[in-house]
Image: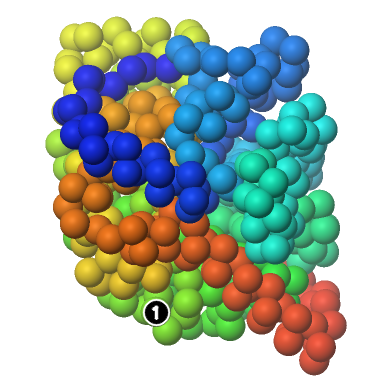
Amino acid sequence: MNAAAPAPAVPADFLGRARELLAAHPVVDGHNDLPWALREHVRYDLDRMDIARDLTGRLHTDIPRLRAGGVGAQFWSVYVRSGMAGDEAVSATLEQIDVVRQLLDRYPADLAPAWTADDMEKARAEGRIASLMGAEGGHSINNSLATLRALYTLGVRYMTLTHNDNNAWADSATDEEGVGGLSAFGHEVVREMNRTGMLVDLSHVAASTMRDALATSAAPVVFSHSSSRAVCDHPRNIPDDVLTLLPANGGVAMVTFVPKFLLQAAVDWTRAADENMEAHGFDHLDTTPDAMKIQQAYEAAHPRPVVTAATVADHLDHMREVAGVDHIGIGGDFDGTAFTPAGLDDVAGYPNLIAELLRRGWSAADLAKLTWRNAVRTLRGAEDVARGLRAIRGPSNATIKQLDG
């Protein structure tokens, strides 16, 4: 992976306090693409990429660095590219779920399966990293509510309604307008997610989709890896008017570390770097060694703008001001991005962000909400809503043809 520029020095006293805080209130990270990286790099051959070892230079994520970073819970993304469709997308999602299950079986001393908020707390008490799953993109259900329920049964606890492209029932932030937010079937998807207890994830979706989902959802929602649009005007980020809706909803917006969503100069640089990747025959999201050689050569010729932990803190300061401290969290997107901020080079870097927030005057109580409590509360809230809804209605068997024509 490409290394960021050296991070500014963090005063030792703040860094020590950050590590103490994370020992008590570890990070719940909303989004990590390790499963896809394992697919792309070694086709799930865990002997060839053993995350019990330090894999610096190959991945952003391994168990030693998760421990060093103070991570107590991780939503593993069971993402598949939105270019996959139909049964191919469903099968690939199942393969992603399977590799997470393989990781849980292989590293039981470090990774604990977590299907509920109580499971997260139990794992923390045991000193293990609670492992949850999130499906990234509604194309993974192939327009089937039964498939949605099957993913929940297999352990998926959020679904991002879209990825980078629209699907048949929801608009993406990075595609042209399709159905204008959510279609009638899209609203039914949200209602069925509420009934099962699966969190509605609004990262990647268009602002119109965000507003439609918040208007429909009876349960708290999550933005698993999104930052503030007021601080960096990128369509993947959250507008202030949407952030103001989170207190009434009870959900959480988890800031991401992807440089092109954090700093305007990085947005422009990344656009040019993506075009260079495509000119060389690579998908811009590709982080395999051959693809990274192209990225590194481009960066050598065109130095990229430096994004730091302080840049991320700027987003969190603004998101806290607009949504309130009870509605913010962290979703780094490690192993899903070629570039990372200085000081947040990999999953060991979280103490640097917490130290920066301590330097800015954030209290220990507020930081405990940011790192642990808000995410756990949000999942618990979705579970509570689901219990109530299941008591009054059964599964929906509606089809997209019935609702959308």
Label 1 environment density (alpha carbons within 10 Å; few <14, some 14–19, many ≥20):
some
Relative to residue 127, is residue 285 depicted above or below?
above
Q: Which residue is mark 1?
A: 247
Q: Residue placed at 22% from the left, 69% from the top?
A: 321
Q: Nearer the viewer, residue 247 or 129?
A: 129
Q: Position of residue 162 (x, y in %)?
A: 53, 55
On the question of residue 391 being in view, the answer is: yes
- Residue 79 place in picture, x, y as percent: 61, 41
- Quadrant in the picture for the C terminus: bottom right
For residue 193, above or below residue 285: below
240 or 236: which is nearer to us? Answer: 240
Give x and y (percent) for residue 54: 55, 15
Q: Is residue 224 left or right of residue 159?
A: left
The image quarter containing residue 189 is: bottom right
Q: Position of residue 139 (x, y in %)?
A: 64, 51
- Amino acid type for the residue under numbered disc 1: Pro
By what rule are the colours in the image chosen? rainbow
**Residue lying at 59% horizontally and 31% vertically, measured from the top left:** 34
Q: Secondary structure at mark 1?
A: helix
* Side of 235 where 139 appears, left or right: right
Q: Nearer the viewer, residue 210 or 155?
A: 155
Residue shown at 40% from the left, 49% from the top = 21
In the displayed structure, would residue 362 be above or below residue 107? below
Quarter of the image where the N terminus is located: top left
